[in-house]
Amino acid sequence: MVRDGARRLLTMREDQQEVSMTFTYPVTSNAAHPASLSPGYKSSVLRAPMKPLIPMRHTLTELTGPVYGHETVREHDNDLTIQHKSEPLGERIIVHGHVQDEDGRGVPNVLVELWQANACGRYIHVRDQHPAPLDPNFTGAGRTQSDASGYYKFITIKPGAYPWGNHHNAWRPAHIHFSVFGHAFISRLVTQMYFPGDPLFPFDPIFNAVTDEKARMRMVSAFDLESTQPEWALAYRFNIVLRGRNATPMENN
Protein backbone atom coordinates (compact mmCIF):
# COMPACT_ATOMS: atom_id res chain seq x y z
CA MET A 1 0.00 0.00 0.00
CA VAL A 2 1.29 3.49 -0.92
CA ARG A 3 0.86 6.10 1.79
CA ASP A 4 -0.90 9.38 0.97
CA GLY A 5 2.30 11.40 1.34
CA ALA A 6 4.20 9.09 -0.99
CA ARG A 7 1.32 9.15 -3.46
CA ARG A 8 1.33 12.96 -3.52
CA LEU A 9 5.12 12.99 -4.06
CA LEU A 10 4.76 10.51 -6.92
CA THR A 11 2.05 12.66 -8.49
CA MET A 12 4.25 15.75 -8.22
CA ARG A 13 7.10 13.93 -9.98
CA GLU A 14 4.78 12.77 -12.73
CA ASP A 15 3.47 16.31 -13.16
CA GLN A 16 7.00 17.68 -13.39
CA GLN A 17 7.92 15.05 -15.95
CA GLU A 18 4.87 15.95 -18.03
CA VAL A 19 5.76 19.66 -17.90
CA SER A 20 9.36 18.94 -18.83
CA MET A 21 8.25 17.04 -21.92
CA THR A 22 5.57 19.44 -23.13
CA PHE A 23 6.64 22.97 -22.20
CA THR A 24 8.51 24.60 -25.09
CA TYR A 25 9.41 28.05 -26.32
CA PRO A 26 7.33 29.31 -29.27
CA VAL A 27 9.22 29.31 -32.57
CA THR A 28 6.92 31.36 -34.81
CA SER A 29 8.92 34.53 -34.17
CA ASN A 30 12.12 33.00 -35.59
CA ALA A 31 11.38 34.59 -38.96
CA ALA A 32 12.49 37.96 -37.54
CA HIS A 33 16.06 36.76 -37.10
CA PRO A 34 18.75 36.74 -39.81
CA ALA A 35 19.33 33.55 -41.73
CA SER A 36 22.47 31.60 -40.85
CA LEU A 37 23.55 31.89 -44.47
CA SER A 38 23.66 35.50 -45.68
CA PRO A 39 25.90 35.52 -48.78
CA GLY A 40 26.62 39.25 -48.57
CA TYR A 41 28.23 38.59 -45.17
CA LYS A 42 31.22 36.54 -46.32
CA SER A 43 32.09 34.69 -43.13
CA SER A 44 28.53 33.34 -42.87
CA VAL A 45 29.19 31.32 -46.04
CA LEU A 46 31.97 29.43 -44.24
CA ARG A 47 30.21 28.90 -40.91
CA ALA A 48 26.56 28.44 -41.85
CA PRO A 49 25.16 24.90 -41.32
CA MET A 50 25.23 22.77 -44.46
CA LYS A 51 22.17 20.74 -43.41
CA PRO A 52 18.80 21.74 -41.92
CA LEU A 53 18.92 22.29 -38.19
CA ILE A 54 17.10 19.89 -35.86
CA PRO A 55 15.17 21.80 -33.14
CA MET A 56 15.93 20.49 -29.67
CA ARG A 57 12.92 21.06 -27.47
CA HIS A 58 13.82 22.41 -24.04
CA THR A 59 12.89 20.43 -20.95
CA LEU A 60 12.32 21.67 -17.42
CA THR A 61 16.03 21.29 -16.65
CA GLU A 62 17.15 23.69 -19.39
CA LEU A 63 14.40 26.19 -18.61
CA THR A 64 15.14 26.55 -14.91
CA GLY A 65 18.91 26.68 -14.44
CA PRO A 66 21.62 27.18 -13.73
CA VAL A 67 21.67 30.98 -13.62
CA TYR A 68 24.97 32.33 -14.93
CA GLY A 69 26.85 35.45 -13.88
CA HIS A 70 24.13 37.46 -12.14
CA GLU A 71 25.82 37.33 -8.75
CA THR A 72 29.06 38.88 -10.09
CA VAL A 73 27.53 42.20 -11.23
CA ARG A 74 29.06 45.06 -9.25
CA GLU A 75 27.50 48.45 -8.51
CA HIS A 76 29.24 50.48 -11.23
CA ASP A 77 29.76 47.81 -13.89
CA ASN A 78 27.19 49.61 -16.05
CA ASP A 79 29.30 52.81 -16.30
CA LEU A 80 32.06 52.36 -18.87
CA THR A 81 33.35 55.91 -18.30
CA ILE A 82 34.67 55.34 -14.76
CA GLN A 83 36.50 52.04 -15.13
CA HIS A 84 39.96 53.61 -15.37
CA LYS A 85 42.02 56.48 -13.96
CA SER A 86 40.60 59.08 -16.33
CA GLU A 87 37.50 59.46 -18.48
CA PRO A 88 37.63 58.01 -22.00
CA LEU A 89 37.69 60.24 -25.05
CA GLY A 90 34.58 60.67 -27.16
CA GLU A 91 30.91 61.51 -26.86
CA ARG A 92 29.41 60.35 -23.56
CA ILE A 93 25.98 58.74 -23.99
CA ILE A 94 23.29 57.06 -21.92
CA VAL A 95 21.88 53.82 -23.34
CA HIS A 96 18.83 52.51 -21.55
CA GLY A 97 15.57 50.66 -22.03
CA HIS A 98 13.58 47.62 -20.96
CA VAL A 99 14.00 43.92 -21.54
CA GLN A 100 10.50 42.79 -22.52
CA ASP A 101 8.50 39.69 -23.35
CA GLU A 102 6.24 39.30 -26.39
CA ASP A 103 3.42 41.23 -24.69
CA GLY A 104 5.55 44.22 -23.72
CA ARG A 105 5.90 43.24 -20.07
CA GLY A 106 9.24 43.92 -18.40
CA VAL A 107 11.42 40.89 -17.67
CA PRO A 108 13.18 41.27 -14.28
CA ASN A 109 16.60 40.01 -13.18
CA VAL A 110 18.03 39.64 -16.67
CA LEU A 111 21.81 39.82 -16.94
CA VAL A 112 22.56 42.42 -19.66
CA GLU A 113 26.08 42.72 -21.04
CA LEU A 114 27.47 44.98 -23.73
CA TRP A 115 30.73 45.36 -25.61
CA GLN A 116 31.76 47.86 -28.25
CA ALA A 117 34.49 49.70 -30.11
CA ASN A 118 35.84 52.98 -28.76
CA ALA A 119 35.08 56.43 -30.16
CA CYS A 120 37.60 55.87 -32.96
CA GLY A 121 36.06 52.56 -33.99
CA ARG A 122 38.65 50.22 -32.49
CA TYR A 123 38.31 47.25 -30.14
CA ILE A 124 40.88 46.20 -27.57
CA HIS A 125 41.55 42.89 -29.27
CA VAL A 126 44.65 41.40 -30.83
CA ARG A 127 42.84 40.80 -34.13
CA ASP A 128 41.73 44.41 -34.45
CA GLN A 129 44.60 46.11 -36.27
CA HIS A 130 42.52 49.00 -37.60
CA PRO A 131 44.98 51.97 -37.72
CA ALA A 132 42.97 54.03 -35.22
CA PRO A 133 44.08 54.95 -31.71
CA LEU A 134 43.34 52.83 -28.68
CA ASP A 135 42.02 54.60 -25.60
CA PRO A 136 43.79 53.50 -22.39
CA ASN A 137 40.75 54.66 -20.41
CA PHE A 138 38.18 52.65 -22.32
CA THR A 139 37.86 48.87 -22.21
CA GLY A 140 34.52 48.75 -24.02
CA ALA A 141 32.65 46.23 -21.88
CA GLY A 142 30.02 46.50 -19.16
CA ARG A 143 27.22 44.61 -17.46
CA THR A 144 24.13 45.21 -15.40
CA GLN A 145 20.96 43.48 -14.27
CA SER A 146 17.42 44.52 -15.16
CA ASP A 147 15.32 45.69 -12.22
CA ALA A 148 11.86 44.51 -11.19
CA SER A 149 10.30 46.31 -14.17
CA GLY A 150 12.86 44.99 -16.68
CA TYR A 151 14.69 48.34 -16.87
CA TYR A 152 18.44 48.57 -17.54
CA LYS A 153 20.85 51.47 -18.04
CA PHE A 154 24.43 51.99 -19.25
CA ILE A 155 26.69 55.02 -19.43
CA THR A 156 29.26 54.71 -22.19
CA ILE A 157 30.94 56.40 -25.17
CA LYS A 158 29.37 56.50 -28.62
CA PRO A 159 31.37 54.03 -30.75
CA GLY A 160 32.86 54.93 -34.10
CA ALA A 161 32.45 53.20 -37.45
CA TYR A 162 35.28 50.93 -38.57
CA PRO A 163 36.47 49.06 -41.70
CA TRP A 164 36.05 45.30 -41.66
CA GLY A 165 37.29 43.92 -44.97
CA ASN A 166 34.13 42.12 -46.04
CA HIS A 167 34.09 43.84 -49.43
CA HIS A 168 35.61 46.89 -51.09
CA ASN A 169 35.43 49.95 -48.83
CA ALA A 170 33.40 48.05 -46.23
CA TRP A 171 32.58 49.95 -43.03
CA ARG A 172 30.42 48.83 -40.14
CA PRO A 173 27.85 51.36 -38.88
CA ALA A 174 28.36 52.48 -35.29
CA HIS A 175 26.88 49.79 -33.07
CA ILE A 176 26.89 48.24 -29.61
CA HIS A 177 26.73 44.49 -29.01
CA PHE A 178 24.24 43.30 -26.42
CA SER A 179 24.02 39.95 -24.66
CA VAL A 180 21.14 38.97 -22.38
CA PHE A 181 20.97 35.99 -20.03
CA GLY A 182 17.75 34.71 -18.52
CA HIS A 183 17.30 32.18 -15.75
CA ALA A 184 18.99 29.32 -17.59
CA PHE A 185 22.51 28.90 -18.90
CA ILE A 186 21.32 28.18 -22.44
CA SER A 187 19.07 31.25 -22.62
CA ARG A 188 21.77 33.65 -23.84
CA LEU A 189 20.69 35.89 -26.71
CA VAL A 190 22.95 38.28 -28.65
CA THR A 191 22.00 41.29 -30.75
CA GLN A 192 23.37 44.62 -31.95
CA MET A 193 22.07 48.13 -31.30
CA TYR A 194 22.50 50.80 -33.97
CA PHE A 195 22.06 54.56 -33.93
CA PRO A 196 19.32 56.39 -35.84
CA GLY A 197 20.06 57.90 -39.24
CA ASP A 198 23.40 56.18 -39.84
CA PRO A 199 24.40 56.67 -43.53
CA LEU A 200 26.13 53.27 -43.57
CA PHE A 201 22.93 51.25 -43.12
CA PRO A 202 22.34 50.57 -46.84
CA PHE A 203 25.89 49.25 -47.28
CA ASP A 204 26.18 46.89 -44.32
CA PRO A 205 25.49 43.18 -45.03
CA ILE A 206 25.19 42.32 -41.34
CA PHE A 207 22.48 44.90 -40.69
CA ASN A 208 20.70 43.91 -43.90
CA ALA A 209 20.92 40.19 -43.15
CA VAL A 210 17.63 40.86 -41.32
CA THR A 211 15.51 40.94 -44.45
CA ASP A 212 12.28 42.23 -42.89
CA GLU A 213 12.54 46.03 -42.75
CA LYS A 214 10.33 46.42 -39.68
CA ALA A 215 12.32 43.80 -37.82
CA ARG A 216 15.58 45.40 -38.97
CA MET A 217 14.57 48.77 -37.57
CA ARG A 218 13.94 47.20 -34.18
CA MET A 219 17.73 47.04 -33.86
CA VAL A 220 17.95 50.84 -34.22
CA SER A 221 17.77 52.81 -30.98
CA ALA A 222 15.64 55.92 -30.56
CA PHE A 223 17.10 59.29 -29.58
CA ASP A 224 15.64 60.11 -26.17
CA LEU A 225 15.71 63.85 -25.46
CA GLU A 226 13.66 63.45 -22.29
CA SER A 227 16.33 61.24 -20.72
CA THR A 228 19.24 63.34 -21.99
CA GLN A 229 21.12 65.05 -19.17
CA PRO A 230 21.79 68.71 -20.03
CA GLU A 231 25.45 69.60 -20.52
CA TRP A 232 26.48 66.01 -19.78
CA ALA A 233 25.20 63.21 -22.07
CA LEU A 234 22.75 62.45 -24.85
CA ALA A 235 20.46 59.47 -24.33
CA TYR A 236 19.27 56.62 -26.55
CA ARG A 237 16.48 54.19 -25.75
CA PHE A 238 16.78 50.56 -26.83
CA ASN A 239 14.17 48.02 -25.76
CA ILE A 240 15.12 44.37 -26.15
CA VAL A 241 12.11 42.16 -26.93
CA LEU A 242 13.01 38.53 -26.32
CA ARG A 243 10.48 36.84 -28.60
CA GLY A 244 7.10 37.16 -30.28
CA ARG A 245 5.67 39.39 -32.97
CA ASN A 246 7.93 42.34 -32.01
CA ALA A 247 11.07 40.35 -31.24
CA THR A 248 14.43 42.05 -31.51
CA PRO A 249 16.46 40.20 -34.18
CA MET A 250 19.11 38.01 -32.58
CA GLU A 251 22.40 36.75 -34.00
CA ASN A 252 22.28 33.28 -32.49
CA ASN A 253 18.77 32.20 -33.44
Image (spheres, rainbow, N blue to C red):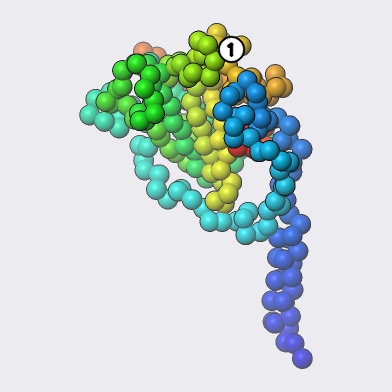
Tag count: 1
Identify the image quadrant of the N terminus. Answer: bottom right
Image position of 58 with respect to 144: above or below: below
Q: Residue drawn at (54%, 51%), measured in percent from left and top?
A: 185
Query: In this image, 144 relative to 40: left or right?
Result: left
Q: Residue drawn at (53%, 56%), measured in percent from left and top?
A: 66
Outermost top residue: 199
Image position of 209 with respect to 170: above or below: below
Residue 171, percent across and down? 50, 14
What crowding class fits label 1: few (fewer than 14 Cα within 10 Å), some (14-19), or many (20 or more)? some
Front in this rendered view, residue 229 or 27: 27
Image position of 113 with respect to 164: above or below: below
Under circle 1, the secondary element is helix
Front in this rendered view, residue 82 or 191: 191
Residue 177, percent across and down? 50, 29
Q: Residue drawn at (72%, 66%), measured in percent from left and top?
A: 17
Residue 108 visible within the image: no
Query: In this image, 85 relative to 173: left or right?
Result: left
Query: In this image, 184 relative to 4: left or right?
Result: left
Q: Residue drawn at (22%, 29%), measured in percent from left and top?
A: 85
Residue 218, percent across and down? 63, 24
Identify the image quadrant of the C terminus. Answer: top right
Residue under pointer 1: 203
